[in-house]
Image (tube, rainbow, N blue to C red):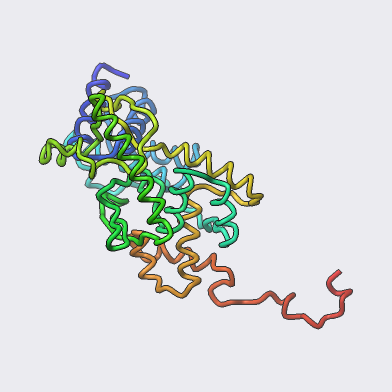
Amino acid sequence: MDDHSPRLLEQVRFALRRKHYSFRTERAYLEWIRRFILFHHKRHPSHLGRAEIESFLTDLAVTQNVASSTQNQALNALAFLYKKVLDQPLDFPLDAVRARRPMRLPTVLAKDEVFAVLGCLSGTLQLIAQLLYGSGLRVGEAVRLRVKDVDFSQGQIVIRDAKGNRDRLTMLPSVLISPLRAQLVRAKRTHETDLDRGYGLVYLPTAIERKYPEAARAWIWQYVFPSQTISNDPRTGIARRHHITRSALQKAVKRAADLAGIDKHVTPHTFRHSFATHLLEAGYDIRTVQDLLGHKHVQTTMIYTHVLNRGGMAVRSPLDLAGNAPDHHLR
């Protein structure tokens, strides 16, 4: 990479933080920009244009066979670079080969399978998994949940800065009220200990931290599911107690599915898929389910109509319809 590159990536990092992008997005965008520069033999992006962007995106689709969502993320990273850092907006159509968006049905568990997996979990990780299924949360939304966003009196959870930077409401299952209260007691005890030791700060978006300087120590802003350890914030170096990691939940759910003998590919996100499907099975309107899931377009929610137990039209197999056929026909 040439002499400009390190400075360029620092400019991108600064711009992303100024715009309050998540740390995960920051890492992903920086990696895509780095790969773009390396793909074009370390030439500075200011010397590259439409043809070079198209060739990079086409290579992702044709040679590396990435998913359409991956190619779109790479494009978004380059669009941010050119518009927000280089002041050269991509205001022209791109003629790159686009990765195909496969039509994949989500894995959904039957209700007894859900409870079998949940039964093989315990403690905090079980409670998080119960929220994924009982409230339809995404994994990131669950682990980032803050104290102030659990509304016991209204029986609801407020999801802040969800996908698409939108807030939404979802239900708080009544059976989880008692375990959640107990979890908050444990979390508060941990927070008070941290304060006594000179810690107790929690990560806050920059704008909130500026507006409310003391909020980072306030109990209501703490994570419902704090990490067991204090670590240095990769952005600032400040020692904080972060939230529990996604990977801990992913590993626990995989183990639980194996223990429960579920012969499906089960991940934490499977609980959210099951939440949506089971609500539709129960007769709830698809628009209601769309709002609870936080989908921008109802077409995204429609995918769950394809995985209902009896199918959208309750079609029976012709083999089942031939119920009175001689036994030898079925051997």
- Residue at the image point whose x is 46% and y is 61% from the top: 275
Q: Quadrant of the C terminus?
A: bottom right
Task: Give the answer, above or below, for where 116 lies relative to 9.
Answer: below
Choose top left, top right, bottom left or bottom right for residue 246.
top left
Q: Position of residue 252 (x, y in %)?
A: 53, 41
Q: Residue at x 46, y 68 (%)?
A: 279
The answer to whether one can see residue 246 in this image is yes
Residue placed farthest to the left in the image? 211
**Looking at the figure, which quarter contains the N terminus?**
top left
Kindly give the residue lying farthest to the top in the view shown.
Answer: 3
Q: Is residue 131 left or right of residue 187?
A: right
**Extreme residue in the bottom direction:** 324
Q: Is residue 40 above or below residue 156?
A: above
Q: Write the residue at 59% across / 72% down.
A: 310
65 lies left or right of 224: right
Q: Is residue 88 visible?
A: no
Q: Nearer the viewer, residue 181 or 251?
A: 181
Q: Nearer the viewer, residue 306 or 290?
A: 290
Give left or right: position of 310 versus 301: right
Please report the residue visible at 53 percent of the width from the left and 38 percent of the height from the top: 251
- In the depicted view, which residue is nearer to us: 195 or 259? 195
Tell me the quarter of the picture where residue 203 sits.
Answer: top left
Label total for image: 0
How far from the left and from the top, in percent, is residue 193?
29, 30
* Left or right: residue 144 compared with residue 283: left
Residue 111: image location, x then y, percent? 56, 62
- Residue, far right: 328
